[in-house]
Structures are given as structure tokens and as C-alpha cells.
Image (cartoon, rainbow, N blue to C red):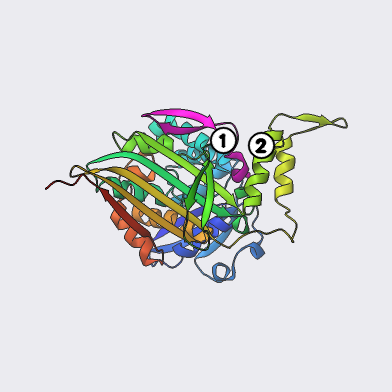
Amino acid sequence: MEMQVLVLGGTGSMGQGVARDLVKQDRISGVILGDINIDPNRVQEKLRGSPKVSLTKVDVNDHKGLVKTIQGADVVINCAGPFYKTAVAVARAAVEAKVNYIDICDDYEATEILFASDIDQAAREAGITVLTGMGSDPGTNNVIVKWYADQLDRVDEIALFWVVSIAELSGAAWDHGLHMTIGKLPQFLDGKLEYVEGGTGVETAQFLEPLGTCQVRYVGHPQPLTIPRYIPGVKKVVVKGVLIPAWVDQLIQEQRETGFLSEEPIEVKGTKVVPYDFTLKLWENIPKNRDKGPQSSGLKVIVKGERGGKQVTLTADMAGRMAPGTGLPASIAALMLDAGEVTAKGVVAPEGCIPAEKFLRALIQRGAKIHQTETITSILSL
């Protein structure tokens, strides 16, 4: 059965990352790139030349128009960030339109609302899946966590680390990159949800080349909210990340500490200015002579637990370009949803509904490389 997919934020880099995989699939009859900006020059040549691809103007803040546009699709994939501003509104419109919804939401605030609001119940009643956080982080690493958890008798601790080079950042990704460091952020510590100061908890993590050794910090991502729902007994779930090169991380910390990321308006020469908005605008225009790092991003998943009475640590590492790394998981999930391989209804996270082995096999078939190690610690008995 043929399938029509609406990709919101479709002319952005993440949306096009999703679309590039979708158009290769025989059962996809059409990919609608929905965006506020439908300038064809924003769309890569491979997509512009595909008979499956069309452009449609859509404003995610126009609820009625959004519902009408979504009704023309079999599934909607929301890539229109930042998601703390868009995910709830688009999910609500999808449920009203009775169309399955997937997003690549990486903002914990939206995830909190999706699980706690009436959207979950309304989606269940409509027989709709609202799959949130189906990118790379969250997304692929959530599925790896579930895959590892199924190999253990007990899961104790989960650490999710990521690094993104600013050479990969554009548009709404910058907004998320700054926003996720502000205020008190959720982490699952000692068996309960706690809120810690953003940018603290610094530790060293080793990523695959060309990323190398990086200092990661607490960031505001959804996994501490979702993983404990699906991995019973886990005592710790932390998410730490960093933007590189190192000068970027250092400057963001200084801006956070000195008020440049404050969202409280201040008066400047008789005009109200929000420091955060001003700083965000400046980050979008980095001088050409500044080091922007490699064209690469990376993930590290660490799951600690017990198997057969022995302490086991399972680690996975990935590195590559951010757009395909984020887009492929959402595309694979959409195909799984259409094939009936994702059966959960209501609001759900990847680790709660995606068949892990089948997903990872599909990801690897598309060229992804997952480097994994297993460490077993036991007391010698003779």
C-alpha cells in the first residue's frame, strides 16, 4: 500500500535528511515538504528532481490550516524546531486530523507536556500513535538503550553523551543548542527525577574520530523523563552533551553565567530587549575566521547492569553527519509505523515501541556504523 508523508520543517536540513531516505522507498508515493519558507532553492537538487517531492506552505502556528494539511498525509514527521515551541501544537493538530505523528523533539519541556496533557488520551481514543523523540539523541540512542537492556537481567545506570560541531548547526538547531543549557534540567538520579543546574556535571568523554576527547555537561534532553517509564528498576539516567570546538562551549558557559542567555527583558535606550534573543542572533553569524570544527557529530551510549550474576557494561559509539543521523531514524520509524510494526497508541517514546533489532538492522543497512564494546566484571571463583 502506497504512503504519503508530510515532513514539517521540510525545507530545513533535518527535514531534508528525512525526505532523502523516504523518496528511495518503493512504497512511498509522495513526500510533501511543508514549511513556512518554500523557496525551491532551499531544497537539495536530488529532492527537487524527484517526482515524489512537492512543496506546500504551512505555518505550524495556524492550527486550522495545519490540521487541513496533515489530513492529506498518512503520517506527519515534525522536523520544525525548536520543539519547545512547536511539538505540542503539531502533535495536537495531528491527533485532531487522526494522522500518526512522529517528531525529532529534543526539548524536555515538550516531552513533559505531551505525556502529561490530554493529547495522550485523545490519541489513544483516535487510535493514533504520537511517537516523540525519534531522531539521533533522542531516538537512535534510546533504541540502543532498549536493545542493551533486553540483554541484561538488571539495568542500573544509563549515560547518554553527545557532541555536535557548530559546522553542523543552522537555524532552529542554534536555538535548541543554547536553550538546553538554561535553568534547572531533568536528570534521573538515585531512582528519582531531579532537576540540576544546566551546564554543570562536567565529565570527560571519548568519542570516535574526528571528534576525540570532549568535556560534556548536563543538558535538557527528554530521556531522563522517558527511559525510566520503559526500563524498570533503573536507578540513573543522565544526558550530557557539548557543542564544539571548545571555545564555543566556554563562551556559552560565560554567556549563561553573565546573563546573556537570560529570557528576562531588559531596557536598552528605551527599548525592551531579551538578552537570549540578542545572543541567539549573534551566534547565527559567527565570523568566518573562527574555527567551526569538523563536519561531524557523535553519540555515546553506556548501559551498566547485571547478567548472570556478573557486572556488565555495554557501550555504543557512533559518529557522522547530523542531518542523515537525525533523519534516518524518523524515516525508518515512519516505514515501521505504516507496516504495522509499531503498535503502541497514544504518546510514546522510541524505547517504548520501536522493535530494537529490526530498527538497528535497517539503520546499518543504510550505512550507519555502531562501534560497541562489552566489559564484564566478576569475582574469580575456582
The residue that mark 1 highlights is: 198
Helix, strand or loop under label 2: helix
For the N terminus, the quadrant is: bottom left
Is residue 170 visible to the viewer in this orientation of the structure? Answer: yes
Residue 245's place in the image compared with 146, above or below, is below
Helix, strand or loop under label 1: loop
Query: Residue type at mark 2?
Result: Arg
Query: Residue type at mark 1?
Result: Gly
Q: Nearer the viewer, residue 366 or 311?
A: 311
Is residue 129 visible to the viewer in this orientation of the structure? Answer: no
Task: Check the image and name the residue furthest to the left.
Answer: 382
Residue 35 coordinates in the image, percent (x, y): 60, 52
Residue at x 61%, y 64% (from the top left corner): 43
The residue that mark 2 highlights is: 256
**Residues in magenta, as a range:** 175-199
* Residue 181 part of the magenta segment: yes
- Determine whether label 1 and label 2 are within 8 Å by CB: yes
Residue at x 33%, y 49% (from the top left corner): 354
Ranked by sequence position, the earlier of labels 1 and 2 is 1
Residue at x 59%, y 58% (from the top left corner): 168
Please identify the quarter of the rendering in which residue 188 is found.
Answer: top left
Q: Residues within 10 Å of mark 1 (few under 14, many from 20)?
A: many
Residue 356 coordinates in the image, percent (x, y): 31, 52
Residue at x 35%, y 35% (from the top left corner): 228
Residue 290's place in the image compared with 127, above or below, is below
Residue 29 coordinates in the image, percent (x, y): 43, 63
* Residue 246 part of the magenta segment: no
